[in-house]
Image (cartoon, coloured by chain):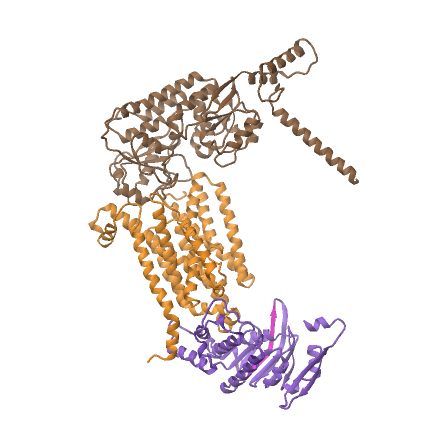
Amino acid sequence: MNTTVKRRLFVGILLCFLISLRICVASAAIPGDLNNDNMISRAELSDAIISYMKFTYAGESVKCLEKDMLRETARKHFTITVTDLAGREVTVPTRVERVVLGQSLYIQEFAALEGENFTEKIVGWGSELETYDMDTYNEYLKKYPEIENIPTVGSLNKNTFDTEAIISLNPDLVIMPLMMKDIAQKSTENLENAGIPVLFVDFWKDPLENTQKSILVMGQVLGREKRAEDISRFYGEQMDKVYSVLNSKEENDTKQKVYVEYGSFGPSQYGMTFSTSNWGPMITKLNGINIAEGVASMAPIDPEYLLAENPDIIIIAGQYWPESKDSMILGYATNLTESRKRLQGFCTRSGWNTLNAVKNNNIHGIHQGISYHIYNFAGIQALAKWMYPEKFADLDPEANLREFHERYLPIDYNGVWILDIGEAQEK
Amino acid sequence: MKSANRETYNAIIKQKSLYLICFAIAVFLAFLTDIAVGSSSLSVYDVFSTIISPHLNNPNTNIIVWDFRLPKALMAIIVGASLAVAGAEVQTILDNPLASPYTLGISAAAGFGAALAVVFGLGTIPFAGSILVSINAFIFSFISFSIICLIAKIKNASKEIMILTGVSLLFLFQALISLLEYLATDEQLQKIVFWLFGSFENSSWSTVLICFVIFIVIVPLLAIDSWKLTALKLGDEKAKSLGINVEKLRLKVIICVTILTASAVCFVGTIGFVGLVPPHIARILTGEDQRYFIPLSALLGSLFLSLASIGGKIVCHKGVFPIGIATSMIGVPFFLSLIIMKRSESF
Amino acid sequence: MKLEINNFSFSYNSSLIFNEMNFKIESKITALIGPNAAGKSTLLKCIAGVLDPKGTIIFDGKNVKSFEKKDLIRLRSYLPQESKITGSLTVFEILLLGMANSLFWKVNEADLEAVSNVLKYLGIEDLALRSINELSGGQKQMVFIAQSLIRDPKLLLMDEPTNGLDLKYQLELFELIQKITLEKGMTTIIALHDLNLAARFADNIVVMSKGEIYASGSPSSVLTQKTIESVYGINARISIDEDGVPWIKPINSIKNKGSVAKNLF
C-alpha cells in the first residue's frame, strides 16, 4: 500500500468517525426538534403530528417519527417551568417518567411523594445509598428487590459522577442536592447541553429554611403537588409543635450547652463535630450553645476542651457502620439494647465520668440522617425535648417519625432512631 | 595538674557540653509550657498545684492535667527524642543528609499498616480499634526494614543500595496508602487521614511507658558504639581497618532505628521533619562526635516537637491541630535557612 | 616484624584477583609496585583486614586467625588511597578515632596522652584543634599518618600515600616514613606508582603484575630493563646514581599488536 492510498484510507476513516459522531450527537437530541434548541415548540409538535397522520392514515410516504418517538415529542412540548432551590428556572415535561436521583439518599423523599410504585420512575441514581445508608438500602431491598438493578451513576462526593452514563439513560429529569452545586457545575452544564433538565433541591445545606420548599418543588415536577402539600403541611405542624412553645418561652432561661459528635469512630477516637452544618444550626435555632462552634468544619474536638466546657447535653449522632463494632449504630438495622450498649460505651472515655451530662444521664443518640432528610422535624423535636424537658414533656419525636413512615413512606418504621441512655449505667 | 592534652581535649568538648546543658534546660522549659497551655482555661497555678498535690483539686482539673496534658507533653518529649535520634543515626550510617526514617520508607510503611488496619481489620476486636492500628503500624515498619536488609545483604550492603531501596519503598507504600484511601469509606478515609497527619490524641500513660522503655533501652545500645559510629566518617575502608565490622554495625543501627521509629510512629502517626531538622542542627553545633551528637539530637528533637505541640494548641483553640502539619510548617523554613547558611563541609 | 603469605587467593565479584600467591616480607620498607589493576590495593586491603581472602597470613610466625581481635587491630594500620572525610572533625578527634575500637565513652588519660605523643612526634601539635577539612593535602596526610601510628602498630600499610602531594611533601613524607620505620622497628609496605621514589626509599621492592608477584628483592636487583619492559610494556634506561640507587628513565612504550591499550589499562 503506497503512501497516497494510506492517506486516503486515513481520511476516509476519520470522516466516517466524524459522521457517526454527528449522528450520535444528533440522536441524543429530542426527536422532532428540528431547530436543535432542545425544546419542542408548538410548530414543531404540529409538524410531527401532521407528518405522522399523513403517513399513518393518508398513506403518504413522508418522513415521520415512530409512535414512541412522537410520544416523546409530545411529552417534551407539554412542559412546566419551576424555580428550584438554586434559584434557577427549570423546565420539565409535565409527565416526568424517567428520573435520575443525583443522590440516591433522596429515595426517602422520592418514595414519600411517589408512594408504593416509586421505583417505576427511577432510571438511575448515585451510589451513595449503599455506601452511606446501607440499612435504608437493605430495608427497601426487602420490599423492592428491583432496586438492585437500578443503574448507579457514580457519586458527586467521590468525584465519580458519570454524566455520560446519565445521558445514556435518557432521563426527563435529574434531581441534585444543592450542597453539591459547585462540585456538580460541569456535570450540570453537560446535562443541560444534552437537553436534560437538572433540578436542585436542598435538605442538607439549610434544612430549616429549605425543606418545605424542596418537597413542594419536587412535588410540582413529579406531578404530585397534592401529596407534596400534604407532606409540607405535616412537616409544618411538626415544626410548630416546637416553635410555638419556644417562641413563648421566657428570656431568662439558662442556655443549655450541647455537644454533638458523629459517632463513627466509636469511643476510642473522637469523631467530627458540627459547627455550621447539620446539628449546629439546629442547636442555635433552639437557643442552645453549641460548644463545638468555632471548631474547624468536620474536625474533632479537643477532648480537654470538652471536659473544660462540661456540656449539659451530649448527643452522639449515629448511623449504620457495620465494620466498626463499637460505633454509634442507629437506623433500621438495630435494636434498643444494642444501641444503648454502644452509647454507654462512649461514657467510658477518659474523664467522661466527671461530666455533668454523664452524671445526669443526659446522653442521647440520634440518627445522623434525620438532619438531612424530609423528616428533620424529628431532629428539632428531639433536641428541643432534651434541651427543655419540662416544656416538651408531651412531645414524642419518635412517635412522630413513626407516623411519618406510616403516612408517607412505603416501608415500615423499624429499629432505633432517637435514643436516650436509659437508667443509670454502672460506672 | 591538668596536662596539656587534657586542656586541648577540654577545649574541644567544652562547647559541646555547654550546648547539651542549655538545650536540656530549654526542653524542660518547653515541657512546662506544654503542660501549662491547653484549650481549657486552667490557670498555670491550677495546673502545677494539681501535679504536686492531685487529690486536693477538683476531679475535672485532675483529669485534664493528669490524663491529657501530662501524657501528651511527655509523648512530645519522648517521641521527639526517638525520631531525632533515629534520624541522626540513619544520616550517620548512610552518610546522606537527606536520609531519615521517612526517606527510608519506614514511616510510610507504618502509615500503610495503620491504613490497612483501618480499612480491613478495624472493628474485628471491639474497643481495641486503635491498638490494632498501632500494632499493624509497628509490624509494617519491620516489614519495610526487612526488605531493605534483605536487599542489602544480597547486594552487599552499600549505602547507595540501602538509600535507593528505602526511597523505592517510600513511593511504594505511599501509592498503597493512596489505593486504600480510594477504597475506603468516608469514615475510614477520615480516620486514615487523621492518622497520617499525626496527633497526640492517642497518648496515654501506657503509650508513654512503652515509648520511654524502648527509648532508654535502644539509645544506650547505640551510644555504646559512639566512637565506632563516629569512625564511619573516615570511610568504610578505614573504619574496617580499625577493626570495626561496618556491615554488622549498619545492620544493628538500622534495627535500632526501626524500633525507635516504629514505636514513635505507631502511637502518634507520621510526623515529618523531626528526623531531619534536629539532627542537622545538632551536627552543626557539636560536629560528628557521636557522644554529643546523639544526646543533642534527642534534646533538639524533644524541643522541636514540644514547640510544635504548643504552637498547635495556640493556633487551634478548640479543636485538634494535626501535629504533622505543625512540624512541616516549622521544619521547612528552618531547613531552607540551614541550607542557605551552612558551610559545605557539614554536608 | 615478619610477614608471610601462603596460598593466598581472592576473588572480587567472581573475577579472580590473586591465585595461590606466596611471599615473605621481612625488611623495613617494602615498596609494592606494578601497573594499574595489578592488584596492589587489593593486596594491601587483604593484609589490612579490610577484605577477606582465602589462604594464610602469618605475622611473626603466628597465624592471623589465632590473634585476639584487639591485638590484631593494634598490630596493623592501614592508610587507604583516598581519605575523604565527610563532616567536620578536628585533628584531635581524628587521632582519637584511630583508637575507635577500644575507646570507652569517657576518654581517659592514657588515650589523651597517646594522642598528644603522636602529635609531638610528628611535630603537628599546632594543628590539634584545626578542622581536618581546612588543612592542605600534605598536612592532611600527616594527620592520617599520625592516626595510623597512634596504636603503635608493627605493620604499616600505605596505599599510594604521595598521590596529589607536591614534590616537597613527597620527599618529606618518605623521610618521615623512614624515620618511623627505623625508630619504631616497624615493617612498612607502601604501594607506589613512582618507581624512582620506590627505588630511593625502599629496602625491598615487590613487583606485581596481573595479580601475581613478578619479582621481589632489592631495588637494584628488581628494577631491570627486562622487568620494566615485561611488566609495564615500556622501554626504559636504568642508570645508577652516586648513592647506588637505580634511576629509571622511561623512553618509549613498546607497540605490540594491539597491546598498547592493554598495557595502559
- Which image quadrant is residue B126 in? top left
A72 vs A215, left or right, is right
Image quarter where the N terminus of chain B lies is bottom left
Looking at the picture, does residue A58 appear above or below residue B279?
Answer: above
- Which image quadrant is residue A340 in? top left
Residue B86 appears in view: yes
Q: Position of residue B4 (x, y in %)?
A: 38, 79
Q: Position of residue B29 (x, y in %)?
A: 31, 57
Helix, strand or loop for the magenta stretch, by majority: strand
* Along the viewing direction, whichever of A258 and B145 lies nearer the viewer: A258
What span is colored magenta in the figure?
C2-12
How many numbered discs?
0
Q: Position of residue A190 (x, y in %)?
A: 56, 30
> For the point 70% across and 84% down, which residue is it?
C237
* Along the viewing direction, whichever of B284 and B246 lies nearer the viewer: B284
Chain seen in orange: B
Q: Colour of chain A?
A: brown
Q: Colour of chain C?
A: purple
Residue at the right extreme, as displayed: A2
Residue C67 appears in view: no
B22 vs B165, left or right, is left
> For the point 51% across and 72% down, which residue is it?
B238
Looking at the picture, does residue B304 appear above or below residue C234?
Answer: above
> For the point 28% across and 29% down, which residue is it?
A385
- Indicate whether residue C133 is drawn in magenta: no
Q: Position of residue B250 (x, y in %)?
A: 48, 64
Looking at the picture, does residue C200 appear above or below residue A86?
Answer: below
B66 vs C167, left or right, is left
> For the point 62% across and 74% down, which residue is it?
C39
* Along the viewing direction, whichever of C172 and C211 lies nearer the viewer: C172
* Along the viewing direction, whichever of A190 and C214 lies nearer the viewer: A190
